[in-house]
């Protein structure tokens, strides 16, 4: 690997792809303006006499804020991630627990009142507004926590999860800033984007980890953060990702706990596998995963590790077409079409 250079065809191809999968700058600006208008309109409706809620705050959140999101893309006939923007609404629970158990239903009505002609969908913890130009805004109602930086996420199942929007954003931004301070092209948030695109490609047609069962972006955030904390980044994307895939393949196959001490001193959960939320040590992100799902993710990572090793070997041997074939296995035909 030490012979790889930033002047190689391989590095240039990956760099070009990294630039392409980012949301376009002009689109980001337009979405930011739209998000602000949606935020203001829904807040006004929630606080109207009809609903009489108190909106404590509407913090910036998610991949749009941390600059780890993807451009909208398609996998068969299905839209995949892309320009999804999280819009949290932190609500004061001042009605004797009324909002606590019906928050999603209340907000569905509020969103429908504000945007009756826009497609919408209730998810486990949000109302997804689906605009005709394929931009989705996730309206995420939450209850205020014990202090200004804490919130309670209320899922449709009734599960309540203590969280912190601010700390989750800081968690990702801190690692991006650390890598930005290192010389070289390879950055943490760009590698995270590549992992998300890889995840979407592998999920295509997967029975165990496809569709709604695909590894969530939050899990991908934590896996890549752990790899970065342990291994940092190298001078080329290929070197970096080969190491990350190998490290994570070993961790997942052996069901080793993924823990962070940014805000707490977490411990392994007494379940099959532990990936502990850095903000809430009681939240094991994969507590409901079956052995089949864990093994499937391990197989994905092992296959990716082997792909990267072949990609690097072919690059060093000047076999550019063979290297490209392996990259397409990782990232789909989009890689070939946009490099």
Image: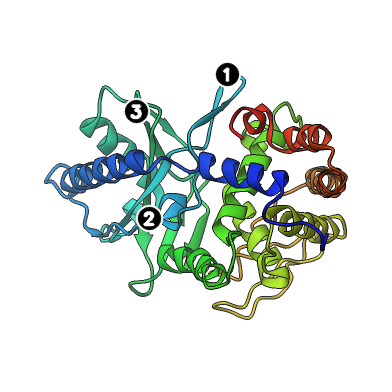
Residue with the most extreme left position: 49
Residue 334 position (above or below residue 249): above
Label 3 sits on a secondary structure element that is loop
Q: Earlier in the sequence, mark 2 or mark 3?
A: 3
Colour mode of the rendering: rainbow
Q: Which of 24 and 39 is in front in this view?
A: 24
Count of picture labels: 3
Q: Which residue occupies the extreme bottom position in the image?
A: 265
Quadrant in which the C terminus appears: top right
Q: Does residue 27 appear in this view?
A: yes
Question: Is residue 272 something that shows in the picture?
Answer: no
Q: Which residue is drawn at 57% across and 72% down?
A: 182
- Residue occupied by mark 3: 131
Which SS class for mark 2? strand
| 181 on left or right of 105 | right
Left or right: residue 186 versus residue 249 is: left
Pointer 1: residues within 10 angstroms few (<14), some, or many (20+)?
A: few
Question: Is 292 on the left or on the right of 185, as rendered?
Answer: right
Q: Nearer the viewer, mark 2 or mark 1?
A: 1
Task: Locate residue 307: give its quadrant.
Answer: top right
Q: How far apart are marks 1 and 3 (CA)?
A: 17 Å
Residue 74 sits above or below residue 17 on the image = above
Q: Where is residue 323 in the image (x, y as percent from the top left)?
A: 80, 38
Q: Where is residue 180 in the image (x, y as percent from the top left)?
A: 52, 67
Which residue position is annotated with label 1?
A: 77
Which residue position holds label 2?
142
Between 65 and 106, the residue placed more toward the observer is: 65
């Amino acid at each position: 690997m030490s012979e790889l250079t930033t002047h190689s065809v391989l590095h240039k191809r990956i760099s070009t792809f990294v630039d392409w999968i980012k949301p376009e700058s002009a689109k980001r600006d337009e979405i930011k303006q739209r998000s602000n208008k949606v935020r203001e309109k829904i807040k006004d409706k929630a606080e109207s006499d009809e609903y009489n809620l108190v909106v404590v705050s509407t913090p910036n959140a998610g991949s749009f804020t941390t600059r780890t999101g993807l451009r909208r893309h398609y996998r068969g006939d299905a839209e995949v991630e892309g320009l999804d923007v999280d819009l949290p609404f932190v609500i004061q629970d001042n009605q004797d627990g009324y909002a606590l158990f019906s928050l999603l239903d209340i907000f569905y009505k509020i969103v429908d009142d504000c945007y009756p002609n826009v497609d919408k969908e209730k998810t486990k913890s949000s109302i997804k507004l689906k605009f005709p130009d394929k931009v989705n805004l996730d309206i995420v109602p939450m209850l205020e926590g014990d202090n200004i930086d804490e919130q309670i996420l209320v899922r449709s199942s009734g599960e309540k999860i203590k969280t912190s929007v601010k700390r989750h954003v800081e968690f990702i931004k801190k690692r991006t800033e650390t890598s930005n301070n290192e010389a070289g092209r390879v950055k943490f948030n760009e590698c995270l984007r590549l992992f998300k695109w890889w995840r979407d490609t592998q999920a295509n047609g997967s029975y165990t980890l496809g569709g709604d069962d695909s590894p969530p972006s939050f899990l991908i955030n934590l896996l890549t953060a752990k790899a970065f904390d342990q291994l940092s980044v190298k001078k080329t994307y290929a070197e970096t990702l080969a190491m990350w895939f190998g490290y994570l393949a070993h961790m997942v196959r052996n069901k080793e706990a993924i823990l962070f001490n940014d805000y707490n001193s977490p411990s392994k959960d007494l379940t099959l596998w532990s990936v502990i939320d850095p903000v809430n040590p009681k939240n094991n992100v994969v507590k409901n995963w079956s052995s089949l799902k864990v093994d499937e993710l391990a197989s994905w990572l092992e296959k990716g590790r082997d792909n990267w090793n072949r990609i690097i070997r072919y690059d060093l041997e000047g076999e550019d077409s063979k290297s490209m074939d392996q990259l397409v296995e990782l990232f789909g035909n989009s890689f070939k079409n946009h490099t």
